[in-house]
Image (spheres, rainbow, N blue to C red):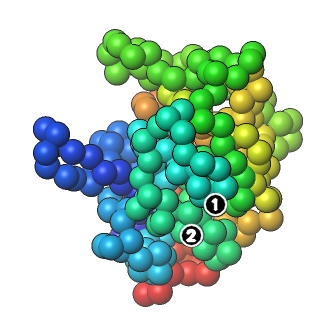
Amino acid sequence: MTRPIVGIIGNQYLINDQYPAHAGGTMTSEAISDVAGCLPLLVPADPRLVSVEELLDTCDGFLLTGGRPNVHPEEYGEAWTEAHGDHDRARDAITLPLVRACVERGQPFLGICRGFQEVNVAMGGTLYPEIRDLPGRMNHRMPPDGTLEEKFELRHLVTLTEGGVFHRLFGSTEVMTNSLHGQGIKTPGKRIVIEGHAPDGTPEAIHVEGAKGFTLSVQWHPEWDAANDPVSRPLFTAFGEAVRAFAAGVGGMRRSA
């Protein structure tokens, strides 16, 4: 049986500081294939190469990945400063209209880290350039040194809205997550519902109110150990179920054959 296709939004890199490449994390593809049960398809997020319309017609759902570059602040009406860090205008040009189109069509997406922030900006929200510089906030960035296991280790609680979609999905109002981000939501976009917060108040889990499809997005990185983690596994399983339903024409506009 043919698996439904999940477009994984890639990031631009320079290999050996010379060779330009579009790439995505192996653990992300594994989570989509092994846990969500879908076919992972890496998307070069560049409007010179792909269009939003082509992606909507090719893929059944989308994973908006994390990445070192941030959403450019001009996308939410602010001027760039050094605190905003690196950016990727090509990815912005694909992902922001893609999110809005998916919300309209009921096409599923899962936002992770930068993807979480993209969903908020796409819906009209704004971001803080650096969470750790705010009074009373934690440093949410990963440790600069150490093994991958140490970088992705569980670091803080996320408290979820009782009775909300995340509470129902995880079966608890508190979950432990990793933390590997510098930016975060400042003002939520239109229809953005914040259902999870870190101990310092930083938003960690959102969805789009009234959307016809799956729009769950998280600030942490659930792709790490997704097959075994008690929070990651139900998230990717639910996403896979939503993608299969969309591919079958249930709960949204089925993509073109």
Query: Relative to 111, is 76 on the left or the right?
Result: right
Report the quarter where the C terminus lies. bottom left
Name which residue lies at 53% across and 50% down.
Answer: 71
State the image coordinates of residue 204 (x, y, percent, origin top left).
67, 35
Crowding at dot 1, Cα within 10 Å, few <14 / some 14-19 / many 20+, comes out as many
Q: Mark 1 and mark 2 in contact? Answer it, CB < 8 Å.
A: yes
Q: Looking at the image, which residue is at 64% across and 76% down?
A: 105
What x and y, as percent, mark residue 64? 49, 53
Question: In the displayed structure, does residue 100 sit left or right of residue 15?
Answer: right
**Residue shown at 72%/35% (left/top)?**
203
Residue marked by disc 1: 122
Which SS class for mark 2?
helix
Q: Residue furthest bottom?
A: 257
Front residue of this view, candidates 4 and 126? 126
Asked if residue 132 lies left or right of residue 203, the reply is: left
Taking the image as drawn, is residue 35 in sight? no
Q: Amino acid at mark 1?
A: Ala
Residue 32 - label: none
Q: In the rendered image, is residue 23 in sight?
A: yes
Query: Above or below — where is 242 with respect to 79?
Result: below
Secondary structure beneath disc 1?
A: helix
The residue positioned 77% from the left and 26% from the top of the image is: 201
Residue highlighted by disc 2: 97
Res 67 → quadrant: top left
Residue type, numbered disc 2: Pro
Tell me if 140 is positioned left or right of 224 in this view: right
Image quadrant occupied by the N terminus: bottom left
